[in-house]
Amino acid sequence: MPLEATMMIIDNSEYMRNGDYQPTRFHAQSDAVTNVFQTKIDSNPENTVGVMTMAGKGPEVLVTHTKDIGQILQGLHVATSKIGGEIDIPTAIAVAQLALKHRENKNLRQRIIVFVASPLDGQAADEKAMVRLAKKLKKNNVAIDVICFGDGIEEAAEDGKTVLRTFVESANSSDNSHLVTIPPSTRLLSEQIANSAILAADRGAGIPDEFMPRDGPAPSSSNGNEYEFGVDPNVDPELAMALRMSMREAQAREAAEAATTSQPNPTESTTQPPTGEEDEDEELRKALAMSEEKDVEMEDDEFDDDEDDDEDEEDEEAAIARAIEMSMQEQKDQDKDSSKQK
């Protein structure tokens, strides 16, 4: 989560009236400035951002160390009336460095972002002078990002380098400074800056490393979209992270279900079902077992019937014995009554 105070130096030279970036270079730059401001503030609520110009009558600070988007918009509105003249990059950077030095929160690291859409002139075109300036920034722990577009795009020398690239490389420390070149295209200037290395650390603030986009091409999908899940992780990292988490949870559930179904049930036989002749043998064994079970049941029934017959015979003999006993008792009683009457 970057903790920074940032000063954005905007190009307000006469070249900013050009319409190769819609609707004009200046308006495209203004849109990019508000996008950078919002990204910086969203990445850390303690961050502050300022805006200044570097053309017209000379470099001028419009807003210093603010967290209010309203002040940024007001500063950009004032800058529209100051379009003209030529840029003075070295002087503007010196003023920006002085403004950052007087930041209220000294824990904030210092960063300068320079928008260049005009040809280099004067000391800005002198590579040695720019290298000296870069070393001074590096000594004072000031990171710098340069965004080149329009006439600010330099033609590379034989070694493939330009003055601004050499300047940024000389100021770079632990990959804290970047140079981005954005030629005219159908894509917005703000969108291309948002996808660049300049805002990479701010876009990833608060998002685990495993959910951040990796270097290299993104996996292609069936509908031909170049981004995984159809979402650009650079533009909307939170949504991309949520989709990745959902996918991983689904994969975990599927793995758990597969592990459960692959385990044998202890109440079931683990042997494979019989086929061909084995089917017939199995059917014969079942029929034999059923037959044996029926035989056992029939034998049990017969044994039960014999017991019932024996019990019935015993009951009849007992009833007869009781009837005889009762008859003999009645006879004895009658004999006693007759003797008494005599």
Image: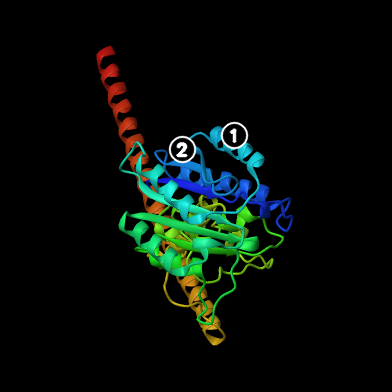
**Label 1 element class:** helix
Residue 70 x, y percent position in the rendering: 56, 33
State which quarter of the image contains the C terminus.
top left
Q: Amino acid at mark 1?
A: Gln
Query: Which residue in the rendered view is the most extreme toward the bottom?
Result: 277
**Relative horizontal placement of residue 80, taking residue 272 as reference (left or right):** right
Asked whether residue 1 is in view, the answer is no
Q: Nearer the viewer, residue 270 or 111?
A: 111
Q: Nearer the viewer, residue 301 or 98?
A: 98
Residue 18: quarter of image = bottom right
Q: Residues within 10 Å of mark 1 (few under 14, many from 20)?
A: few
Q: Nearer the viewer, residue 197 or 249?
A: 197
Asked whether residue 129 is in view, the answer is yes
Residue 304 x, y percent position in the rendering: 41, 56
Marks 1 & 2, CB-CB < 8 Å contact:
no
Residue 198 x, y percent position in the rendering: 49, 57
Query: Residue under circle 2?
Result: 64
- Residue ID at (56%, 68%): 218
Residue 4 x, y percent position in the rendering: 39, 46
Q: Is the residue 197 above or below the residue 79 in the image?
A: below
Query: Residue under circle 1?
Result: 74
Q: Amino acid at mark 2?
A: Thr
Q: Is the residue 337 above or below the residue 193 in the image?
A: above
- Residue ID at (40%, 59%): 209
Q: What is the distance, in whole Å, between disc 1 and disc 2 at their CAs?
A: 12 Å
Q: Nearer the viewer, residue 142 or 276?
A: 142
